[in-house]
Amino acid sequence: MMRKLALIALLASALIVAGVCIAAEKNIMDTANAHANLTGFVGAVETAGLTDTLNTGTFTVFAPNDDAFFNIPTEDYKALIENSTELKRVLTFHVVEGKIMLKDLKDGQELTSVQGEKLSIKVGSNKTVTVNGANITEADITASNGVIHIIDTVLMPK
């Protein structure tokens, strides 16, 4: 009986590990697409034609959640979606080369976005982390080619 329980536990552990490995094999866009709160981000990336770009390098993405997109005034959002160049500029401002986990972000750190401008990191005394003032609401969503941190604001470059 003990041997059967040990075998069942071993098989269950193997299935859990296999599930984690399978989940980690999704690239950034597949991972974002599977997240219920990133539909606006995924749609914007697809509209801008940046899907292949985000799937072919190693990136840290500060992805605005759906509420962040809903908080953009309607006229501004429509103008942004209709201007491919500006949409790409805004979206690439949310992306940094390399895989940076939350624990690796330091207070006062500056990251250079793929768009070219700096992103400023602030770490509060209660361990809250902001990027250019946007709160990271969910962190360390891993993908095969990077990591996604969800933020509560669409960041606008200068």
Image (cartoon, grey):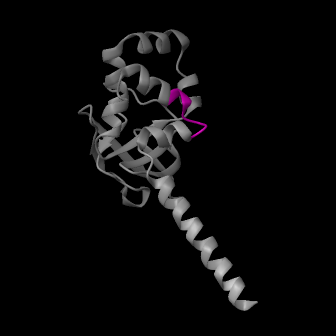
Residue 2, how many percent across, how many down? 72, 90
| Quadrant of the frame with the C terminus | top left
Quadrant including the N terminus: bottom right
The answer to whether any part of residue 124 appears in the image is no
Residue 38 among magenta residues: yes
Across and down, in percent, residue 74 comes to 55, 12
Residue 81: image location, x then y, percent: 44, 15
The answer to whether residue 129 is left or right of residue 34 is left
| Front residue of this view, candidates 65 and 7 | 7
The region drawn magenta spans 35-41
Q: Which residue lies at the image location 37% right of the left edge and 21% below the top edge? A: 48
Q: Give the tally of numbered discs.
A: 0
Above or below — where is 82 with respect to 31?
Answer: above
Q: Is residue 82 left or right of residue 89?
A: right
- Residue at the far bottom: name it: 2
Q: Residue at x 58, y 23 (%)?
A: 70
Q: Is residue 35 left or right of residue 140?
A: right
User: Where is residue 52 drawn, in percent x and y?
Assistant: 33, 32
Name the residue nearer the viewer: 39 or 78. 39
Residue 50 or residue 69, whichever sits in front: 50
Q: Residue at x 42, y 61 (%)?
A: 103
**Foreground residue, 36 or 95?**
36
On the question of residue 34 being in view, the answer is yes
Farthest left residue in view = 116
Q: Residue furthest right?
A: 1
Q: Is residue 150 above or below residue 81?
A: below
